[in-house]
Amino acid sequence: MGAAVGPVDAAELPRSAREVVAEIRRSSVESFAALRHTSECARALHPPPGSLPASLPAFILPTCTLLPGERADFTLFEPRYLALARHALGLDGGAAPPDGRYAHLPDSASGAVGTVASILSHQSLSDGQVVVRVLAGPRARLVRTSRLEEVHRPDGEGGPPLPPLQHVALETLADEPGEDAAADAALARECLERLAKLVPLDQLPQSVNVPPLLSPERLSLWLCGVILRANDTTARVQWLCERSTRKRLEFVASTLARESPRPGAS
């Protein structure tokens, strides 16, 4: 159990990289643990250009669209997705070092938009299933299927051939430049402050990563992840595909405006 913290005032959150560094230095969190966590999240959320593998195994899950920065737990039992976990975690005896990432997609068609997800931790169960905890990273569009990996049933099990594991080539997706970056940043800040009046930021679910304060585009996607239900896949896919930061922020602002602040909220 972590130490208790007081309510978070959105207006007092850091507004620049220098202020973020100053907050880290004032923090009581163990420095090396914080650095390991930061490095792990940075690799997952903001991989340098050109650092993604040429192809990644794909997890096709129409009922769960992850937005950048979201965490989720999955129990894998289908043979092809067990093969995905073994491949990503380097448990299949392959020569290449494990990458830990895969494509999390709503469907397998060319042009489908999802996220590049990173496996943060895993647990192998006695019945052969694997539980993974993942962090969704940047948006990506499926360009083409690189190959289909044949998957075999466990020894002694009969039946028809199993669906193959799809490996895909991706291209990362970013918003188009806005006409007024300062206005976008102001609207993003306004949305965050409205959210803090509805739900204190320190009381958000643990599956929600900390808000990316210095990028209106990333903050707009984070806000969508907070206000959209996990089963609202239509809206999640819509705003994941949207390439206008302003439109996404206007949707968030209008949604938050319809909600009532909690009693006692400032």
Image (spheres, helix red, strand yellow):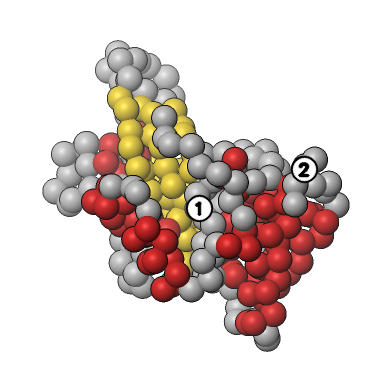
State the residue position of label 2.
264
Q: Quadrant of residue 61?
A: top right
Front-most of 219 and 110? Answer: 219
As shown in the figure, which amino acid type bears the numbered disc 2?
Answer: Gly
Residue, disc 1: 210
Identify which amino acid the numbered label 1 is placed on: Val
At 71% from the left and 66% from the top, the residue drawn is: 190
Left or right of 204 on screen, residue 30? left
Answer with the quarter of the image where residue 151 lies: top left
Find the residue positioned furthest to the left. 95
Query: In the rendered structure, which disc, 2 or 1, sits on the residue that comes first in sequence?
Result: 1
Identity of the residue drawn at 42% across and 35% down: 2
| Nearest the eye: 153 or 44 | 44
Residue toward you, 111 or 122: 122
Q: Is residue 135 above or below residue 47?
A: above
Mark 1 crowdedness (10 Å alpha carbons): few <14, some 14-19, many ≥20? some
Query: Where is residue 60 drawn, in percent x and y?
Result: 51, 43
Against 73, is 250 above or below?
below
Image position of 203 (left or right of 130)? right
In this picture, residue 159 sits left or right of residue 176:
left
- Residue at the image position 28 percent from the left and 37 percent from the top: 86
Residue 46 x %, y %: 40, 64
Which residue is at the front of the view, 86 or 30?
30
Any part of residue 62 in sight: no
Dot label at residue 26: none
* Spot occupied by residue 98 in the image (x, y as percentages of width and height): 23, 48
